Image (spheres, coloured by chain):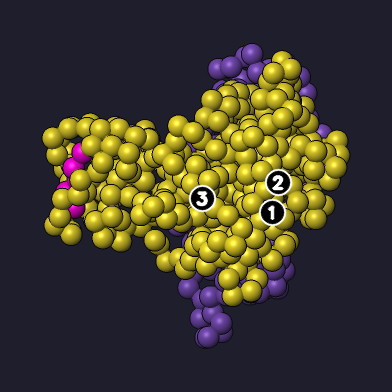
Amino acid sequence: MSGQTRLTVIVTEVVAVNSLIKRFRFVREDGGLMPGFSGGAHTVVEMDDNGTRRLNAYSLMSDPADTSGYEISVRRDDTGRGGSLFMHNGVKPGMKMVISQPVNLFGLDLRAKKHLMIAGGIGITPFIAQMAQLDSLGHRFELHYAMRDRELGAYMKELSARHGERVHAYYDLEKQAIDLANLLKIQPLGTHLYVCGPKGMINWVLSTAKAMGWPKGALHSEEFLAPPVGEAFKVELSRSKITVEVGPTQSMLEALEAAGVDAPYLCRGGACGQCECRVTASDGEILHYDHWLSDEQKAAKTHIMPCVSRFKGERLVIEL
Amino acid sequence: MSQTQADEVMKSRPLYGTLTPKQGSSHFIVADGEGGDAVAALLNAAPDMKPLAHIVYIPGANGTDLTALLEGLGARVFHPAPSYASASQRIRKVLGDAHMGLQLYVAGTEGLIGQVQRDAIAAGLPHDALTTEQRGSKARRVQCVHCKGITENVTLDPFVCSHCGLNLFVRDHYSRRLAAFQGVCIDAEDPGEVPPSEERFK
């Protein structure tokens, strides 16, 4: 991991928010205060799932002004690789865990005149921390939160109680949808737009805003990708002079770590750019899944992001 | 008059492009001096913009005055102003009342582009949200780092600060916040030993 120290924490609360979402609270084992963070930050939670090391990034949802602990929410993904299932089934109050220092790749631009936030489903979590921060700073904000139904509308009640008419809910099953074109049209100059949720929603919001003339610098989004599964492949490391086998359900980064290579990483979700590796030879197709490399870089096959991307072909050599 | 070519590169030194039409709900265009030609080229290339366009034009400090050309373009609003100071209240009001989707274009001297950019940032726009084109005089707006006074239309280097009288060397170091280049005393160690001034910014 890149220049980061980890925090040893105790799980003090595990709350079933609804049938799919659990909330966890962590405090420091040594009783000290947590490092400060800003709204939008995440932490990488390390899990020991019966010998398999899993590291997943989760947005911090607690009030950034409260450094007595961190809270995250985890949506159970029954078809995922197992991290969220471990959090749901294996993590109990009193357990000791290791988490990373907070990292913010989805920070607020406090120069904005207004913050317009659009959340889909579990994508609400970074906004809960951001709204607490903006509320105490006295900044202007507005949340539009789309979710499947009232049962899964985690946190809507608390958010309405705290932020009143600044939060708006949309329930898919009640045929409610965000009137995005109108919403984007009526925002005062100097508004920044933030979106977090499923990929389709992020693409829809960003492409609509761009088409309506919103400048790139006013658009912010965050989507953590789970490393996709795929076919097994081999990767040669030109500096370490070893070849590592990547299994079908393993990411290249995880395979490198299992082989004892101290590869750089931060978000492990294709967003931050920290794990970028130069490709020195590739006879085959690089399956780029990240949000980091430009389309030109992806096409040029000169770089790969081992946290999410894979390879299909004869030979891949990276500089590591 | 063709586009002004930038001849130095320093990281903080702003670079400019060409006015090209952007997708937007309204178009706010500010120009000075020879920048008027860039505005005419923009609106003639994209006449659909005209009913949504608001132009503020300031004749150049060098005497270039394209008011008649711009007045005849058929923009929804055309407002001539004698100086940036006299136009700034309108510029801030337009930005303050606008909605996202407004596109901002600036053409002309660096001093003008920088001041509109500064006001746009104050209105909450990202610094790179403007479409800019440098035209006409390369004269600089310079802040004396000693007395903090700003001298407009600096063409000579070194030059004498119009506020405190120090001999200033004009650096490429640029401040977006001040919309000005930095001027530093050139003879602090050996007072009076000043190299001859050259006309570096025509």
Q: Which one is nearer the viewer's eye here, B62 or A296?
A: A296
The chain whose colour is purple is B
* Residue A189 visible to an observer of this rendering: no
Image: magenta residue range: A233-237
Q: Which mark is residue A62?
A: 1
Q: CA distance from mark 1 to mark 3?
A: 22 Å
In the picture, the disc for residue B98 is none
Q: Please say if A180 is above or below B194.
A: above
Are discs 2 and 1 located on one and the same chain?
yes
What secondary structure is marked by label 3? helix
Find numbered disc 1 in the image and state the secondary structure of the residue it sits on: loop
Residue A102's place in the image compared with A172, above or below, is below
For the question of whether residue A242 can be seen, the reply is: yes
Q: Are marks 2 and 1 in contact (CB under 8 Å)?
A: yes
Residue position for label 2: A128
Question: Residue at the spot x=75%, y=51% of the render?
Answer: A132
Image chain in yellow: A
Which of the 4 quarters of the picture holds residue B55? top right
Up/down of B184 relative to A171, above or below: below
Residue pictured at 26% horizontal, 60% vertical? A260
In the visual, does A91 lie left or right of B150?
left
Residue behind mark 3: A90
x then y, percent, for residue A10: 58, 64
